[in-house]
Image (tube, rainbow, N blue to C red):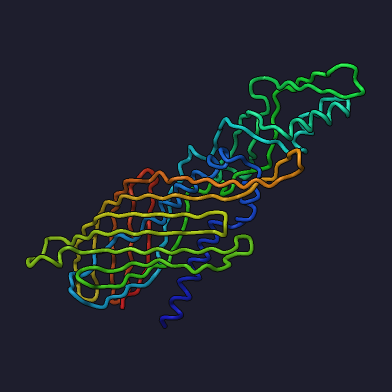
Amino acid sequence: MGFNLKKTICSVCILILSQNYVHAQSLEKRLEQLSESAAKYYLSPLVNTFGANINSGWLTTPPEKKILGLDIELGVVGMGSYFDDSQDFFQSEGTFRFSEDEAANLTASIDDPVIREQVVQQIIREDFNILIFGPSIIGSNSRNIQVMFAPDGAEDFKVSDPQYPFPVYVKLPSQLIDLGVPGFLDNFPMMPSAVPQIKIGTLYGTRMLLRYLPSIDAHEDIGKMGMFGIGLQHNPGVWFKSPLPVDVSVGFLKQNFSVENLVNVSAMSYGVNVGKTFSFGWFALTPFAGYLRSSSSAEINYSRDIETDAGIQTVKINFKMDGENKDVFNLGVNFRFLFVNLVADYNFAKYNSFTAGMFFSF
């Protein structure tokens, strides 16, 4: 039974996580069209909500007030964090290196093919100040990101060629280039996730918490995906001779989640919660509330092909983004019937989230 349960939990987690990153290969292709500054704006909503997700769902019912005992809780927890609708569109100034095809579109108004080719070659070898705007990763997939060439009005070019007795000056006006990069989640309201979770205790009121998803090929468009998290939760009531009116626990959890070489997310949270168990024979009800201090960051790695004097070269782009959720307050309840636990809680933070889980106790 234990082996089948583990297999079932992993299958559910793979399925839900795959829905988050379906077409991850096409996501990488989209990033390859963006500069680093634009990619940060594009990915920001995803980084914030996924960080909020994986930092939730673990600080729930306190451990038993035992000096020594064997208690195992195994199951899966699902999370959902709401996107900020104001982040479905972004606009940013920055620099951009145009491809040869994009430069050809910018110079379409030049009639002389010799002059046009020389201007194209100048464009593809220079970074230009631009305005870039369009849907973020949570935005509409029917709209594309646009780049405004020469946002200040025009760009001047000088062409010198032996067939012309004097230099030729060309002025290109402001123009929009469609990068062909649409939104990814198409205005989906929230970021869903799921993780397998096991709690093992109890030693002096302390239990260990593990989250683990082996590195596996979850989807042909995703590649290898894996996760690992470890933490501790302690009930200080074990040290008091007289029982406290409520159960109190403190704990921390550190996690890492990766998708191939494209995304690596690290997260950590620690906090305190209180709960009170009301038992009715085979049924028990435990409302709880708590406070978490959380942090998360995502490291993004991708590459872009750019034109240089030596030909097309691949430039590696690597940057790190921090999640914005810091202070989190949660309210929840745990229902227990025999060896089955059903838990649900809501987290109040900059990016609100909710969790629901089903666990089996042994």
Look at the picture and state if 325 lies above or below 354: above
Horizontal arrangement in the rendering, residue 58 relative to residue 24 (left or right) = left
- Residue 45: x %, y % from top left: 49, 44
x, y percent for residue 79 = 42, 57
Q: Most extreme residue toward the top, as rendered?
A: 166
The picture quadrant where one finds residue 117 is top right
Q: Quadrant of the C terminus?
A: bottom left
Q: Is residue 155 above or below residue 319?
A: above
Work out whether residue 167 or residue 19 is closer to the camera in this orientation and state it: 167
Across and down, in percent, residue 181 comes to 65, 43
Specify the farthest residue to the right.
163
Report the residue at 73% width, 40% height from top.
307
Image quarter hosting the N terminus: bottom left
Quarter holding residue 36: top right
- Toward the left, the furthest residue is 242
Image quarter for residue 270?
A: bottom left
What residue is rendered at 24% in x and 76% in y? 282
Left or right side of 260 for 57: left
Residue at 32% over, 48% down: 328
Q: Nearer the viewer, residue 255 or 4?
A: 255
Q: On the picture, is 326 further left or further right than 110? A: left
Can you give x and y, in whole percent of width and height, for residue 314 in the image? 68, 47
